[in-house]
Image (tube, rainbow, N blue to C red):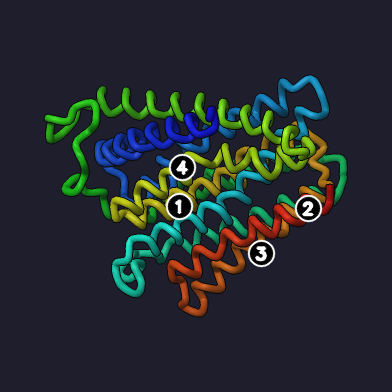
């Protein structure tokens, strides 16, 4: 019951967040794609990054550091599989013709995925080797995100329009909300998302042993689903509103943050040495992204094929359970 309550609260908070973040993007004169890849992604990925920071820097046991590394690997896995799979399913449910993606600007998406893939492969490779100065390479991941941030802000020149925006929930009677109201709703929604997500993770960590799952399986299999739930909820809400570009941009932007910031922290403060389950999570994530890039290359990026990305998470789940 508690899991269901947390999920509902996260969804409602995400409704407030996506409503506020679009108005925030308008006030900051940001482009539509940049609102998804940068503004919304930073907001929803910040709680997970803070959790990783606390785990790897303040954790008093090896288990705490393992949780931090698991979060850095599990987050991108959940986004590359479940988030895209759910997005494909939502597009199919809209029933707007043979391909609801027709007419949607997707030019930026494969470019973002190529950025992610190159960085992700590098971080997985670092988990397979050991050498003295490896921790310092964590700084490269922060630099990579800064470069991505600058690229996104420069590339998206078309400003987000407020013509089709719903009124701000805090000021429903005002055509243009005040900056203070936008900030209060954005920050307030993020706080609720953060607290609810942590409660959701706590419930999963309690449920895992009850189901006979080991700590490793719970950390890699169930926890990432909870921590990435805000991004998944955002995608559901934006696709329901017909804003597919924002939905997919939010996922790809969150993936870039998950591939860089938590990874940089993990490499700096842990041995960053992968075991079987971590290697498996890395391989499945890479395969899922290669699948998406293949769809773009053969021009078959369609909802039902996108929904198939969720199958890769099922493959990972089976493999992880067999390993344990």
The nearer-to-camera label among 4 and 2 is: 2
Neighbor class of circle 4 (other Cα within 10 Å; few <14, some 14-19, many 20+) is many
Q: Is residue 81 left or right of residue 4?
A: right
Mark 4 in CB contact with mark 2 (< 8 angstroms):
no
Q: Does 267 appear above or below 243? A: above
- Describe residue 315's horizontal placement relative to residue 275 as left or right: left
Position of 105 relative to 124 (above/below): below
Question: Could you tell whether 25 is left or right of 141 in the image?
Answer: left
- Work out whether residue 320 can be spotted: yes
Decide which of tag 2 and tag 3 comes sooner along the chain. Answer: 2
3D distance between C-alphas at marks 2 and 3: 12 Å
Return the residue at label 4. Answer: 41
Circle 3: element type = helix
**Res 209 quadrant in image:** top right
Q: Which residue is mark 3?
A: 287
- Give the foreground label among 4 and 3: 3
């Amino acid at each position: 019951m508690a899991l269901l309550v947390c999920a509902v609260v996260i969804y409602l908070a995400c409704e407030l967040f996506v409503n506020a973040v679009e108005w925030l993007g308008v006030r900051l004169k940001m482009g539509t794609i940049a609102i998804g890849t940068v503004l919304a992604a930073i907001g929803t990925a910040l709680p997970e990054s803070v959790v990783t920071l606390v785990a790897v820097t303040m954790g008093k046991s090896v288990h705490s550091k393992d949780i931090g590394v698991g979060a850095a690997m599990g987050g991108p896995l959940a986004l590359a599989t479940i988030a895209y799979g759910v997005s494909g399913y939502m597009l199919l449910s809209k029933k707007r013709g043979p391909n609801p993606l027709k007419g949607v600007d997707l030019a930026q998406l494969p470019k973002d995925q190529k950025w992610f893939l190159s960085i992700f492969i590098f971080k997985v490779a670092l988990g397979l080797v050991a050498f003295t100065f490896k921790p310092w390479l964590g700084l490269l991941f922060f630099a990579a995100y800064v470069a991505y941030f600058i690229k996104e802000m420069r590339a998206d020149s078309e400003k987000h329009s407020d013509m089709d925006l719903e009124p701000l929930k805090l000021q429903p009677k005002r055509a243009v909300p005040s900056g203070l109201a936008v900030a209060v709703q954005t920050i307030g929604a993020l706080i609720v998302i953060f607290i609810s997500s942590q409660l959701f993770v706590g419930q999963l960590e309690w449920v895992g042993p009850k189901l006979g799952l080991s700590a490793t399986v719970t950390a890699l299999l169930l926890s990432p689903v909870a921590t990435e739930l805000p991004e998944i909820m955002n995608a559901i809400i934006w696709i329901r509103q017909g804003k597919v570009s924002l939905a997919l941009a939010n996922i790809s932007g969150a993936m870039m943050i998950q591939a860089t910031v938590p990874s940089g922290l993990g490499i700096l403060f842990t041995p960053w040495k992968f075991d079987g389950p971590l290697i498996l999570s890395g391989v499945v994530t890479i395969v899922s992204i290669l699948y998406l890039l293949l769809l773009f290359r053969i021009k078959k990026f369609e909802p039902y094929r996108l929904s198939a990305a969720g199958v890769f998470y099922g493959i990972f789940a089976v493999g992880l359970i067999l390993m344990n």
